[in-house]
C-alpha cells in the first residue's frame, strides 16, 4: 500500500486532524469559559471542557481562534484528496465528532447551562460548519484548476510527440501510430522508404 493511500484513509485523516487540533489548542492554551450546573463532577467537567475548547467561544478573541483553527484543519483533506466532495465530507466528519459528544455530555450533565446557551452555540456551530463546507469546496476547486493548468502543457507535449510518431504509407495512404517495418495493408517495406527519405 502506498503512503498516499494510507493518508487518504478517513480514519488516518481524522486522527491527524484531531492531533493537530489538540496541539494547537494546547500550545496556545485556549480555554472557553463555561458556567456548569451545581453538582457536576470534576471528570464530567473535564470531558465537556476538553470538547468545548475545539468548537466553542464566548469572546471575540475566541471566535477568531476557533475559526482560524478550523480553516487550518480543513486544508489537510483538501491537499490529500483530488475531489471536493471527499474533502468537505471529511472535514464535516471531523467537525461533527466533538460537536456531537459535547452536546450529548452537556445536555446530560449540565442541562441548565445547556438549555440557556443552546441557541447561541447551535447557531455558531451551524455557521462554522457552513464556512468549513464552503471553504473546503472553494480551495479544492482552486487546487484542481491550478493542477489542470500545470498539466495542460504536458498534455500538449504528448500530443505533439504522438503526431511526430504518426507515419503514412506512401503507396496506400494507411496511417500508423508507430514506425512499423511493413505496411499491414499493402506489405510495402517502410524501412527502405524512411531510409531513402533520411539518406
Image (cartoon, helix red, strand yellow):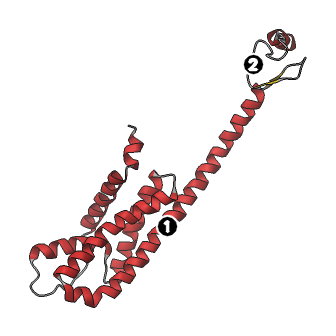
Between residue 124 and residue 89, name the one nearer to us: 89
Residue 153, percent across and down? 68, 42
What label does residue 179 carry, if any?
Answer: 2
Looking at the rendering, which quadrant does residue 93 occupy?
Answer: bottom left
Q: Is residue 131 above or below residue 147?
A: below
Looking at the rendering, which quadrant does residue 16 occupy?
Answer: bottom left
Tag 1 near tag 2, CB within 8 Å = no
Check disc 1 and report the residue beneath it.
135
Residue 143, percent across and down? 55, 55
Looking at the rendering, which quadrant does residue 59 occupy?
Answer: bottom left
Q: Residue at x 58, y 50 (%)?
A: 147
Say whether residue 12 is left or right of residue 31.
right
Mark 1 / mark 2, whichever is N-terminal: 1
Between residue 167 and residue 26, name the one nearer to us: 167
Q: In this view of the protein, can residue 31 be seen by the observer?
A: no
Q: Is residue 152 above or below residue 48?
A: above
Dot 1: within a 10 Å radius of its alpha carbon, few (fewer than 14), some, or many (20 or more) residues?
Answer: some
Residue 88, percent across and down? 46, 63
Identify the element where label 2 is drawn: loop
Identify the element where label 1 is drawn: helix
- Residue that lies at the very extreme toward the right in this rendered image: 171
Distance (Cα) linking label 1 and label 2: 50 Å
Between circles 1 and 2, the one closer to the viewer is 2
Residue 67, percent across and down? 39, 72
What label does residue 114 carry, if any?
Answer: none
Say whether residue 188 is left or right of residue 102.
right
Q: In this view of the protein, can residue 124 be seen by the observer?
A: yes
Q: Residue at x 35, y 73 (%)?
A: 65
Query: Quadrant of the image for the C terminus?
Result: top right
Amino acid at each position: 500500500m502506498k503512503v498516499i493511500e494510507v493518508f487518504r484513509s478517513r480514519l488516518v485523516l481524522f486522527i491527524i486532524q484531531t492531533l493537530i487540533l489538540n496541539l494547537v489548542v494546547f500550545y496556545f492554551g485556549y480555554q472557553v469559559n463555561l458556567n456548569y450546573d451545581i453538582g457536576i463532577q470534576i471528570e464530567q467537567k473535564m470531558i465537556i471542557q476538553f470538547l468545548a475548547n475545539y468548537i466553542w467561544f464566548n469572546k471575540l478573541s475566541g471566535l477568531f481562534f476557533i475559526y482560524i483553527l478550523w480553516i487550518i484543519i480543513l486544508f489537510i483533506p483538501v491537499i490529500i484528496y483530488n475531489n471536493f466532495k471527499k474533502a468537505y465530507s471529511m472535514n464535516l466528519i471531523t467537525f461533527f465528532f466533538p460537536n456531537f459528544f459535547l452536546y450529548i455530555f452537556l445536555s446530560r450533565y449540565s442541562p441548565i447551562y445547556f438549555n440557556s446557551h443552546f441557541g447561541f452555540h447551535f447557531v455558531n456551530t451551524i455557521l462554522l460548519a457552513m464556512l468549513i463546507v464552503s471553504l473546503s469546496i472553494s480551495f479544492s476547486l482552486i487546487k484542481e484548476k491550478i493542477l489542470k493548468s500545470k498539466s495542460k502543457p504536458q498534455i500538449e507535449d504528448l500530443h505533439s510527440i504522438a503526431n511526430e510518431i504518426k507515419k503514412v504509407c506512401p503507396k496506400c495512404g494507411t496511417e500508423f501510430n508507430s514506425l512499423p517495418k511493413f505496411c499491414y495493408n499493402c506489405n510495402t517495406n517502410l524501412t527502405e522508404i524512411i531510409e531513402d527519405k533520411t539518406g
